[in-house]
Amino acid sequence: NATITTASLMALKQRREPIACLTCYDAAFAQLLERAGVEVLLVGDSLGMVIQGRPTTLGVTLDQMVYHTGCVSRAATRCLVIADMPFMSYATTERAVETAARLMGEGGAAMVKLEGGAWLAETVAQLARSGAPVCAHLGLLPQSVHQLGGYRVQGRDPEGAERIRSDALALQEAGASLLVLECVPSALAESLAQTLQIPVIGIGAGNRCDGQVLVLHDMLGLTPGRAPRFSKDFVAEVGAGTGFAAAVEAYLSAVKDRSFPASEQTLA
Ligand code: KIV
Ligand code: NA
């Protein structure tokens, strides 16, 4: 079982095998997810909500992201580990380079993720030139929740869809290696996955993306309160008592055969 690289993700896209990704914040789950065969571990700033109990991701610090990225990357030797750049840590290109240096150098991530569109093209290009592969993130941008006025579907109107499309093309052109699309209509996600050369990983974006990601705690039924509609509790599906590994294996096979997300987890 070879190490997963950006080239392996491209190869999966080319042979139309969906890429399985989950968020991960610690060594124990990193080992469990890697053994199950998940390809990509995202140390998401969603840890602010599921680990720290915050209402948004905005309070997560770079020190905290470096700490959790280290916890994951020390245990995952085969998975590709992506670390989120926290709120405002890439507000300028100079800061983005310093942030990536810590997440990759101290934290051991193989890729960094940032939220936003074409205005980040120069930052993405500078990161890529410096040796930091970049995952872009479009659609619902949780770090912009106060700008967006809530967590809701993006790109439903023609202008919104066109903006997401042109942002995606600009970021690919700038050198992004991967794109996460969050909470967009499945038709838009499908057409972007077809248009872009780089793999498109969806969350709340239908089953025609090049891969899927979920917040680990949502898919294990551990999220306090109501989990997002596009998520699914795989522990409930396999039966409590069969364990987390069985739930992750069920997720993996559902991603691979595109039975997840089904229509009930898909936004139009
Ligand atoms: O922080 C996170 O978990 C994420 C995923 C929702 C893509 O960014
Ligand atoms: Na995130």
Image (spheres, helix red, strand yellow):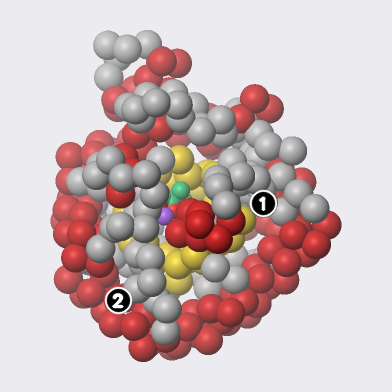
Closer to the camera, 151 or 184?
A: 151
Please tell me whether mark 1 sits on a helix, a strand or a loop: loop
The kind of residue tagged 1 is: Gln
For this view, does 156 lie left or right of residue 60?
right
Closer to the camera, 42 or 31?
A: 42
For this view, does 183 lie left or right of residue 240?
right
The kind of residue tagged 2 is: Thr
Tell me the tag on residue 154: 1
Residue lying furthest right in this view? Answer: 158
Closer to the camera, 185 or 190?
A: 185
- Of badges 2 and 1, the one in the foreground is 1
- Residue drawn at the location 51% of the way across and 33% of the way down: 228
| Label 1 CB less than 8 angstroms from ligand 1 | no
Please tell me whether mark 2 sits on a helix, a strand or a loop: helix
Q: In this view, does 72 lie above or below 86?
A: above
Instruction: Give how far across and how far down residue 193 sits, in percent.
Output: 68, 56
Which residue is tagged 2? 99
Q: In this view, does 142 lie above or below 27?
A: below
- Residue drawn at the location 40% of the way across and 76% of the way down: 90
Q: Is residue 83 above or below residue 174?
A: above
- Residue drawn at the location 25% of the way across and 63% of the way down: 61
Could you tell me if residue 20 is visible in this image? no
Instruction: Give how far across and how far down residue 4 sits, in percent.
Output: 38, 58
Q: What is the quadrant of residue 84 in the picture? A: bottom left
Could you tell me if residue 232 is visible in this image? yes
Estimate how packed mark 1 is, as few (under 14), some (14 to 19) or many (20 or more) residues with alpha carbons within 10 Å.
Answer: some
Of callouts 2 and 1, the N-terminal one: 2
